[in-house]
Amino acid sequence: RRHEGPSPTSAPGTVVRLQTMSACTLRRILLSAGTLLAHSRGAMLGREAIRAVEHYKPLRQTPRLFEGTWPSEWFDARYLSMHDELKRGNTSAFFALAREEGPDVYSFPLFTPLFCELLMLEVDNYKASGLPFRRPNSMNNYGLIFNEIGMRESLTELQQTHLLPISQLLFPKVSSQFDDHHSFMVQYKGGEDLGLDMHTDDSDVTFNICLGRDFTGAGLTFCGMRGDPDHRHFQFVYQHEVGRVVVHSGDKRHGADDIETGQRNNLIIWNQNFAWRSSKENLALRQQYAKEASSPDIQCLSYTHDRDYALFKTPPPGQNLRGWCPPPGREYPGFGEKPKASPQPISQDEL
């Protein structure tokens, strides 16, 4: 992250204190300031976005999506039964329903096709209204931000009632609380975004729900955890199913495979715990980055982030490679040497 220095008009004493305090203390102050800014994100959408929310209110196709009531018919019956058991303290009910797709990645049925279709029709209706909307994040070009069309409060209710208890079960350290979320829809289809480069999320825990529509391809490839020796080593490919959610740490490296036919849309909720982010433990973990064990698997390469991408693959047209990974001093043996033979993708059957 980039941080500006002291203002030229700051008192001299302030500058001296900033110059003499430890780097760790300064990072904590800057992270805390960033946390406060993020916490007020909902109140700082900008005049245009606020006007769009107000103008869209009378045009809403399914008002209940914005009310936060979350009726039972929107949820898969198997999920509702598990949710009731979880409230009684029966954690085994979750593991009986969920699939462990790979290391620390789980999926389970969450929504019915009815809900997925209602939400997609609402997206279509909003786009047809002519009101403005932004791209969902810095990597996806197509989709929209649900928080900015009036669904923030409704999705906060979903987060606190349904997502948080599961996250606390799977990732207790980073899920002591959820203070905010960035909730958005991504869209993949021919002529637009076909897939998404390898990345990690600005999220402590990510919930990714497939909404449809008919498609082939567009799997989700998972690799290792950020900072681990094998973080650029292939683990598995997850295949999306409508209404099913996949849950993982935001530090898990992953990317969307190219779509082959049709259109895939997903509701993605990045959950954020400000207390964890500003904690001494998290700040210390962020400083740790293990030396890579060996050269990366080609499925796990990122043209956005990886310094050695061009050694293994041809960069996409127009991409100006400015990678940072691996950090200096954390390179695998032989880093920078072109492979003697073209590496082949590893299949799940080989693992």
Image (cartoon, rainbow, N blue to C red):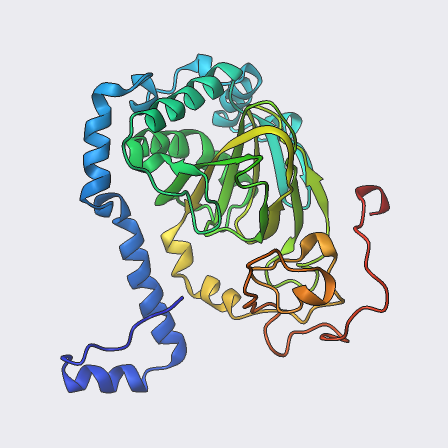
What is the x, y in percent for residue 100? 68, 36
Front in this rendered view, residue 113 or 89: 113
Q: Residue at x 72, y 44 (%)?
A: 236
Residue furthest to the top in view is 73
What is the x, y in percent for residue 324? 56, 69
Q: How many marks?
A: 0
**Quarter holding residue 293:** bottom right
Front in this rendered view, residue 290 or 83: 290
Residue 205's place in the image compared with 143, above or below, is below
Residue 158's place in the image compared with 288, above or below, is above
Q: Residue at x 54, y 65 (%)?
A: 320
Front in this rendered view, residue 54 or 224: 54
Q: Residue at x 44, y 43 (%)?
A: 270
Q: Quadrant of the N terminus?
A: bottom left
What is the x, y in percent for residue 38? 31, 52
Residue 147's place in the image compared with 14, above or below, is above
41 lies left or right of 262: left
228 lies left or right of 277: right
What is the x, y in percent for residue 179? 34, 45
